[in-house]
Amino acid sequence: MKYQICRDCMFQKLLQFICLIFLFTLASCDKKDDQRLEESPFFNFLNFSNINIDTSSSGNKTWEYGFVFNFLKKGEIRKIGLKLPSQGEFTVRLWDFESATPTVIHERKIRVNQIHRPEFVNIPSFNAGITNKMGISVISNTFYRVQKRDSTAFTFPLQIGNINILSFNESEVISGESDFPNNTNQLRVAPCVNVVFVAE
């Protein structure tokens, strides 16, 4: 009888030990996922050397502008956001270029409460493959306009981390239109909108 009780105790302790190992392994995996690098490449233009930054807190016209990009590794887009020199609420759109016409897959109104500070919002994770071509844009009459001091063009595609920036695009907003801006500009870019991408 005592032998049976001891054996039961040993079994319970073994079971507890296995459960602890499982929970520790699970926590380690979650911690590893949390430590994956979050990449937000488009604000980097503001930190380039030998540039001039023209800051417009309120323009006469409203523009939709942003970037076309793809990926060097598989991963997921978790957030979209912006950084502007003016307070207010602005529409940010994430576009999918896989069909013949770019399609909005996520659209969020993001409030800027403090100027010059990045503001991000979570979106349902979008799994992106290497072949995925995407766009990110913001509708705004305020911006940072970045230009090289020697007035030469930015070279695209431009690789920053695991994201390959294909072009900067802009178009004046006309009532009733909802297309991705189709005018490219290599001399001046407005890096005011961004994504948070995590590679696998």
Image (cartoon, rainbow, N blue to C red):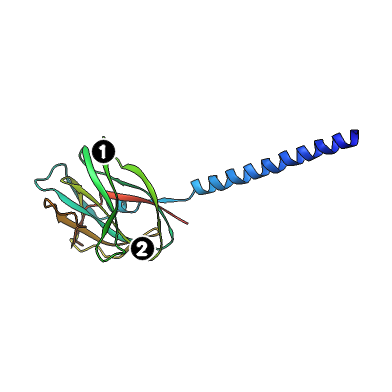
For this orientation, the residue located farthest to the front is: 1
Q: Which residue is mark 2?
A: 132
Q: Is residue 149 visible?
A: no
Identity of the residue drawn at 15% across and 54% down: 177
Q: Position of residue 108 (x, y in %)?
A: 28, 45
State which quadrant residue 95 falls in: bottom left
State which quadrant residue 149 falls in: bottom left
Q: Quadrant of the N terminus?
A: top right
Q: In terms of secondary structure, where does tag 1 sit?
A: strand
Q: Position of residue 85 (x, y in %)?
A: 21, 41
66, above or below 109, in the image: below
Residue 76 is left or right of residue 156, and the answer is right
Disc 1 residue type (three-letter): Arg
| Along the line of sight, the residue nearer the viewer: 18 or 34 | 18
Identity of the residue drawn at 63% across and 43% down: 24
Q: Is residue 129 visible?
A: yes
Identity of the residue drawn at 38% across and 66% down: 131
Disc 2 residue type (three-letter): Asn
Residue 159 is left or right of residue 59, and the answer is right
Q: Which mark is residue 172?
A: none
Q: Which residue is mark 1?
A: 111
Q: Position of residue 34 (x, y in %)?
A: 49, 46
Q: In terms of secondary structure, where does tag 2 sit?
A: loop
Residue 48 is left or right of residue 141, and the answer is right
Is the residue marked by circle 2 packed among few (<14), some (14-19), or many (20+) residues within 10 Å?
some
Real-space CA distance between mark 1 and mark 2, rounded to the nearest whole angstrom: 28 Å
Q: Which badge, 1 or 2, is on the more N-terminal residue? A: 1
| Along the line of sight, the residue nearer the viewer: 179 or 147 | 179
